[in-house]
Image: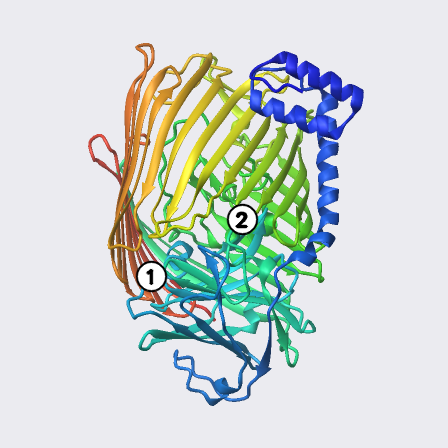
Amino acid sequence: MPISKGSNRDYQYCYFRIKKTNSYIDYCLFYIIFIFNRNESRIISDQVESQMIRLLFLLFFLLCNHNILISQSLLTQRTSVIKRVNSDIKIDGILDEPFWDDQNAMDLFINQWPVDSGLAVVQTSVKLAFDDQFLYVGATCYDVNNKHIIRTLKRDRDDDYFGSDALGIVLDPVNKRSNGFFFGVNAGGAQIEALIRVNGSSTDLDQNWDNKWFSEISLGDSVWFVEMAIPFRSLRYDPDNKTWGINFVRNDMKLNTYSSWNQVPVNLNTIDLGYTGLLQWETPPPKIKNGAVNLIPYVSGNLRKDYEQQQPVSASGNIGIDAKVALNSSLNLDLTINPDFSTVDVDVQQTNLTRFSLFFPERRAFFLENNDLFSFGKATVNPFFSRRIGLVNGEAIPINFGARLTGNVSENIRVGIMNIQTGSSTGINAQNYTVGSIHRRIGQRSTIKGLFVNRQTTSSNKDSIQNSFNRIGGFEVNLLTPDGKWGADVGIEKSFNPIDLKEEEFYSATVRHNSKNLFASLTALKIGKDFLTDVGFVPRLTNYDAARDTTIRRGYTELAYFLVYNFFPKSDIINIHGPRLSTTVRLNPNGTFNETYNGIFYYINFKNQSDGEINVTRRSDNLPFDSFIVGDIPFPQAKYKYTNVGFFYRTNPRKRISSFTSSNYGGFYDGDIFSVDQRISYRVQPWGNFSLTYSLNDIRLPENLQSTTLHLVGTTTEISFSNKMFWTTFLQFNTQSENFNINSRFQWKYRPMSDLFIVYSENYATQNLNVKNRGIVIKLTYWI
């Protein structure tokens, strides 16, 4: 069967052959031809779409059954036995307690990166013990010298943690390879604790989970030692389960290597739950007392002056409390009354060169912990996005109280239930938000998920434009083979509103393959124009028509693939290199062309931790309306095609001075663009990190439009006086938003999980540097 470029005859040939043979192979070929041709074809019929859905369900069925076949091919699981101790332990980083000599050593660590075979050059030996309160870890980390790489002393910084010499423990108390815990400490004593969650075909850390635990390190001659004490009450487990999943991760950045106790393939994260070893309990782990409560009250005060509105200095104070209640060993209840988010990090500014809203991540800890339970949809379509709660058009709305119940209700079922009540503001009603989610494990690593979201108005304001309610119901199936090589998911979400709407559904499906050399994903999604999500993020659904000064909802269909091939050369210079291919096609509801993106990239990762990429991209955009993109003049409705070339290069981050540079040149609608992003970092180990970033977008357009040059400048200063006291200052100068922001935050962890914050902020206009507002916040929290 011919596959040529842009031929409607090929589409017709495939279509009639499909109708004749009803072959799933032909449906696949038809889909491939569509992806590679990417023209304005309108012949995707309802029959083809329905058959593609049948094909995806068939693939999911095969993947489920594939679990049984492939489970035999997993790497051998190592096993260790943990023993109870009855003597006192001092967590000081010195393994001098006599009982350590009687514990089983977990040693002979295996390479994981940049190769996943053979014993690690720098070895590690770990021993475990427990009593009624704590799981104890004692580790000896052998080294080639004492010149450690320590990127930061700040807590919970996964990018800097995995870029430092460090040791971490992976725990899967349920031993179901679906979620777990991570505790780590670097050679400077900085801690990180996180939840481990399976995200598609990868395993990620949710470092927003906070809990109280203890660790210390000590340095020897070409060796360093770690002691940890992890409270059992911070974990969720079945005390009758005497087999846990466990692994250890050792970072050695001098050699740019990662190693693990149980072997993990090089194409996966070292923390992958599919490749943990087994921890056998000599006696059952202790039962956690039901109803154990941790309280975290706070008190805050602030001063603020608004110069734009010529308001006098205003002073205010606030008090509130959070609580963590262990209902049982596997179910946790979080409560908050009058929460305060004034000390949350500021958003990192972005330059917007699109006609849609930009995505800014959630940063409030209450919403981030266990957020994998509420994660549905795709990267560009989020049926539930917690940042919509308590924030309306950038204005903070007070949250009166909230509750969140998360954890396992049985061996195979996880639940998440959240309820938030907000107050009212000018023109904005008080709202109640309820979110419910249930995850049912099937097979070894697969999950069926359900989601319900409800926003309900609880006060009446005649000036409010909000509807009385908005609801979302969703169902997803996520499939993953035990070795993590194959994954797939399919989902459907639907919105419910006070008025009767017709196209309220969102459908999605993805198939993925992840092996040592090859990663490939194929995604299809369809969004109805009435898929309204007041507590979601679907930016492409709303289009602004500048000619008529109105917004119009337009549904669309999206088809995309991403392909990566890695070469692992036997080289003293390069770790991996290889091509990447990416295509995204979007169609209007009637099958006509909306936009396409095609990119070809070549990536190289070097043994000194530097890396780089060159790329060529091709875009086509059929603007449906006159649209504001940059400048004050709308771009006319038309079809645009343009090509860009670019590159990025990142130097060795282990050096005192390192940098990142990227550049792009080519077309931009009817004009041209030249862009540069530059970051220069200076590190004074281990206490100081200083960086300067600069982004330039120089856009030249025809005379009927407005050419513009956009600048975004930022500086970051991070000073760690110890691993308990930090001072961080951000400066951001953005000509697109016409704002210059200064944010300086001092944090002192005067005891575990208890903090003093002092935050000072200023905002200026970029044109004349006139001050807009100033403010200072002081906040004290205390963990009881």
For this view, does 263 lie left or right of residue 287?
left
For this view, does 111 lie left or right of residue 659?
right
Image quadrant assignment for residue 227:
bottom left
Residue 81: percent from left, percent from top: 60, 78
Q: Is residue 247 above or below residue 660?
A: below
Q: Is residue 411 above or below residue 625?
A: below
For this view, does 50 lie left or right of residue 404?
right
Q: Which mark is residue 620?
A: none
Badge 2: few (under 14), some or many (20 or more) residues near its Cα, within 10 Å? some
Q: Is residue 497 above or below residue 605?
A: above
Residue 416: percent from left, percent from top: 63, 54
Task: Tell me the CA gap for discs 2 and 1.
Answer: 24 Å
Asked if residue 53 can be seen in this view, the reply is yes
C-beta proximity under 8 Å, tags 2 and 1: no
Residue 286: percent from left, percent from top: 62, 78
Q: Which amino acid type corresponds to the residue marked 1 in the rendered image?
A: Lys
Mark 2 and mark 1 lie on one chain; the one further toward the N terminus is 1
- Front of the two marks 2 and 1: 2
Give the camera-side residue of 311 and 390: 390
Residue 194: percent from left, percent from top: 50, 60
The structure residue drawn at horizontal position 53% and vertical position 38%, both measured from the top left corner, is 379
The structure residue drawn at horizontal position 47% and vertical position 54%, both measured from the top left corner, is 365
Give the camera-side residue of 297 and 742: 742
Residue at mark 2: 516
Asked if residue 529 can be seen in this view, the reply is no
Residue at mark 1: 254
Q: Which quadrant is the N terminus positioned in? A: top right
For this view, does 779 lie left or right of residue 38?
left
Q: Residue furthest left?
A: 768
The structure residue drawn at horizontal position 42% and vertical position 62%, both measured from the top left corner, is 298
Q: Which amino acid type corresponds to the residue marked 2 in the rendered image?
A: Lys
